[in-house]
Image (tube, helix red, strand yellow):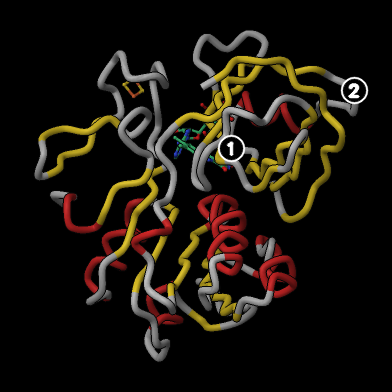
Amino acid sequence: MKQGIYEIKSNVKIAKDVYKMVLAGDTSAITATGQFVNILLEGKYLRRPISICDWDGDSITLIYKVVGGGTEQMAKMPIGEKLDLLVGLGNGYNTAKSGAKPLLIGGGVGVPPLYALCKKLIAEGKKPQVVLGFNKAEEVFLKDEFEALGATVTVATADGSVGVKGFVTDAMKDLDYDYFFTCGPEPMFRAIERTVTVSGQYSFEERMGCGFGACMGCSCKTKYGNKRICKDGPVLEREEILW
Ligand SMILES: Cc1cc2nc3c(=O)[nH]c(=O)nc-3n(C[C@H](O)[C@H](O)[C@H](O)COP(=O)(O)OP(=O)(O)OC[C@H]3O[C@@H](n4cnc5c(N)ncnc54)[C@H](O)[C@@H]3O)c2cc1C
Ligand code: FES
């Protein structure tokens, strides 16, 4: 994990209340897809965690939804503004455990970290399928980008305004997969848990306190005792979680 100053290269709206921000700076601390950054914002005591959607040698892409004061501040930031980030936090997804036909399941702002994961799985010769769940058509993002990578994408919307009407689990019914990776809200995880019969990895976007393992404010019960989402996660394996 490294702390650094990152400069905003772009910050654009890509769906209802959802923005894509590209930051320039040191990316050497990023070791796995599914890791996150923790952003220091003016007037906020706690940093705000956001998953790494993608990165290269000198830039990081984040996708975030405006839900409160911190993300509202971010949405107003102009190109050239500098942000203090902790980078390379969390364990990330372990692609070595994937089968040849993994299913990537993203719900809302849980979708971003699956993008770099999808790229990695394809580079490793796997054939990922992607299911993206949103409430309505105007909230959909990254569908075209996943397709451009070569993945098959199914969108589910709760109101049926685009794609399959219903939840990600409705869109998963007829798909053939041998492993899964997911990120999104916990109610979605519980529905997935009732649906899947194969192994997989869940990435939790819990509300956090300190963000670096000191407060236990983000703990999750596992077979191996309480794990901290910020430090031991955010990715936990299906078999270890006590729901
Ligand atoms: C590991 C991790 C990765 C994340 N990745 C992303 C991402 O890629 N994109 C993204 O948009 N968001 C992501 N989040 C959620 C993001 O951190 C919060 O939405 C953000 O901190 C809210 O800050 P705020 O100041 O705007 O809202 P606040 O003023 O802090 O809160 C506003 C409202 O949002 C709710 N809220 C705040 N944080 C969360 C949360 N973690 N989960 C659910 N509800 C919350 C609060 O209960 C409140 O109702 C991630 C969270 C974690 C822990
Ligand atoms: S947020 Fe403090 S231990 Fe995870």
Amino acid type, mark 1: Val
Circle 1 residue: 67
Residue at 53% x, 78% y is 127
The image shows residue 152 at horizontal and vertical percentages of 60, 81
SS category of the residue bearing label 2: loop
| Depicted 72 relative to depicted 86: above or below | below
Left or right of residue 166, residue 233 in this image: left
Ranked by sequence position, the earlier of labels 2 and 1 is 1
Per the rendering, the mark at residue 179 is none
Q: Quadrant of residue 15?
A: bottom right
Q: Quadrant of residue 172?
A: bottom left
Circle 2 residue: 80
Residue at 66% x, 64% y is 140
Q: Is mark 1 within 8 Å of ligand 1?
A: yes
Amino acid type, mark 2: Gly
Foreground: disc 2 or disc 1: 2
Quick one: 185 or 33, which is closer to the camera? 33
Number of other residues with Cα within 10 Å of mark 1, as a class: few under 14, some 14 to 19, many 20 or more: few
